[in-house]
Image (cartoon, coloured by chain):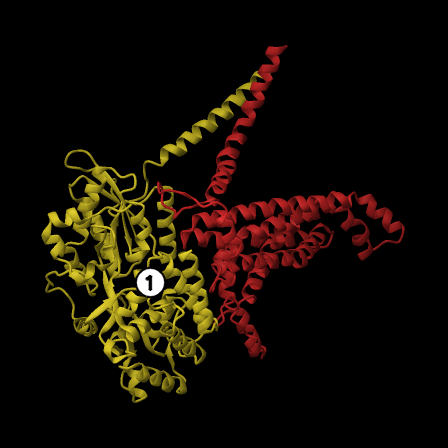
Chain colours: A red, B yellow
Amino acid sequence: MRAKKRKDLIIIVMFLLPAIVIFACFIAYPVGDTIFLSFRKWKGIYGASREWVGISNFTKVLADKDFWKSLLNSFYFMIGGFVILMPLSFGLALIITSKIKGAKLMKTAYFMPVMLGTTAVALMWVYILNPSYGAVNEILRFVGLDKVTKDWLSTPTLNIWCVILVNEWMFAGYNMLIFAAGLVSIPGDLYEAAQLDGCTGWKKIRYISIPLSKESFKIFSILCVTGCLKAFDIVWAMTKGGPNRSSEMPATLLYNEAFTYKNFGKSSAIGVILLVLGIVLSLGMNQIFRRKE
Amino acid sequence: MKKMRKMAAILLAGMMVLSMTACQGSGGSTDDTDASGSSGDTGKSGKNVEISVSTRYASDNPDETYYRDMVGKFNEMDNGIHVTLDNIATESDYLDKLRTSFANGDTPNVFIEYGGSRCYDYLESDALLDLSTYLNEDKEWYDSFYDSMWGQSVYDGYDGIYGVPFKSYMVVLYYNKDLFEAQNLTPPTTYEEFLSCCETFSAAGITPLQVGEKDVYRFGHFNNCLVIKSMGVDGVDKLASREIAYDGQEMMNTYQIMADMVSKGYFGNDILDMDATAENSAFESGNVAMHYDGSWYVANNLMGKDFYDHVGVINFPYIDKAYENHNQGGSSDIWFISKLDKSEEEIAASVEFLKYITSNDYFAGNNEVASAIYPAEFTVTDATPENPLLEDINKIVAATTDMRTDVQNYDADSSMLDTVRNSLQGLAMGNSAAECAAQIMEEVNAFEE
């Protein structure tokens, strides 16, 4: 009996080993190293001493205006996520799960930006938003709205909103699938019963689709909050956090601190703060959803 | 069934371990293609030393094509050394990769940097090879370089020479002869004349300058010229020692000049959405009156083009007459050898490669395809094409009494260059001179803490 248990244990360990090794190498070790580095001063040269500086990296980060500005930009990303991306994705999910003609074609069309890849999408929009020859300003000039034309990616605050809108355009299709998965799992007879009771159109969405998609909203919310905190690629490809650090996000700030300014300790401190913030926000969201349940 | 499950588990775990080992093993070798395309298994003694060389020379311009061809020829020699190239054209990407390699310890054997305080951290961490022994052993090699070119390769508090100059430059002002003639203007020598030209061109609907400030070094170079032409090279040294403050009146004046030029549109339109390449194209389109740039601009952008004959070149206008012949210039691209985890054979091979790539023959051949100003003396061959613009630049170089490269290259803070350039970019967004100074001072104060 004991030998059998031992055998089973070995099998369990063997099956778990790949996941544990991957987790240890690619998550636990880097996180541990980042925490270790966040209390040290290191100029980013292999073998060079890493001087213990206590919590000074953290105090420097928290006293840094650019850090708070980058968090504000993250907050804008979250606002965009909940106010624009969530309703948009849910609306698209309603369309592709409905029985209207061409739903399949729409599903592919909406998902297309996700398949294009971040860099391709970002570059495309950089050209579209170019103030001299970009399509947006050209259209505005064509319709006589010359005064509305802007230098979209170089004007502070406006530039981060442009990036947010491009991000929403790109990920609407991806999030649409999350909501669509929830919508198709709602039993059809619920809608039929509701229809018999006179519940049609918007009311069906209000009283059946939205409440029964709670799990999808929960997944979206956690993905959105954590995704907004760590957003890097789209910002880097469109503005590199500039000009003059005006569109910096915490992740681009982290990168610049490490690789432009060689403050690897401060950069790691930003990473640790982001990690803690991500965990706290995710737990907070879970609590909120649990309470509502 | 149970046996199957057990086998699957063992197989999975085994594959995992194997793949990890394979990952580790691949770190020691490289499958990058070399410059000649050969496998590189030659060698006098049968022992092949493999060295990696990182540069920004990835473009198709004659200068960089020549470099790659010459490395290819080096690989074809029977010297037991095989060079693998890693070329990344974009400056920021190149520097990011280089910095990452220093962080993880997998540095190239030989690499190009710009010297000065930017390399100070590498030096402080004992990652750079002191080349003075090799240069002293080969006096001919050392003496071939102009004395003024070693400034960015030596450091206070550290004995030795840590880099070998490869390229040199001077920032000058190019102008469109046709547009100046059409407006009855003579090329400016003083800053007042320069501003007056800008005003005339602007009034005539011609863009005086078109700057591509998406590449932050553009305003950086302009500010360098303002500093050097108003305070001389002493001003640069005083800034480095903090005798002159970045928020002092002297520096505030330079920011103010730039802020005023931005607000008057003298730097052109959409400058934050335009990079240096687009800036060059704008000047070469013939609709922009002036263009400040390094001497490399002639070889890289003008040689062989019809536009060449329409361009003139002058010294950057001075603000204080005393500094008329103080200029921004010096050695730009400098070779360094990393000794982080490198064997003696690799270091010896790296030095041999450096001697080859900075030899008289190399520079003479380079001069035939892409004439420029060089950090070393060499015999000019008959095959070198005529280049009146370069001759004019050489006259400016000859008249130069003192020069400095990027102002922040002499600073004790290795990230000062990026700090100042980023803050100057704020001027293009409409920031005031005071805001620009405040941003720089934040970094200065943080460094001093």
Residue drawn at 44 percent across, 73 percent down:
B433
Left or right: residue A112 compared with residue B124: right
The location of residue A291, given as percent across then percent down, is 76, 44
B11 or A62, nearer to the observer: A62
| Whether residue B270 is visible | no
Q: Between residue A173 and residue A56, name the one nearer to us.
A: A56
Q: Is residue B110 shown above or below A19?
A: below
Side of B98 where A191 appears, left or right: right
Dot 1 amino acid type: Gln
On the image, which quarter does residue B428 sit in?
Answer: bottom left
Q: Position of residue A215 (x, y in %)?
A: 72, 44
Q: Position of residue B370 (x, y in %)?
A: 21, 63
Rendered view: A90 above or below B302: above
The outermost residue toward the bottom is B184
Q: Mark 1 points at which residue?
A: B408
The chain that hosts pointer 1 is B
Q: Along the horizontal axis of the image, is B188 left or right of A22?
A: left
Q: In which quarter of the image is residue B204?
A: bottom left
Where residue B58 sits: x, y (%)?
Answer: 31, 55
Give the structural element (helix, strand or loop) at label 1.
Answer: helix
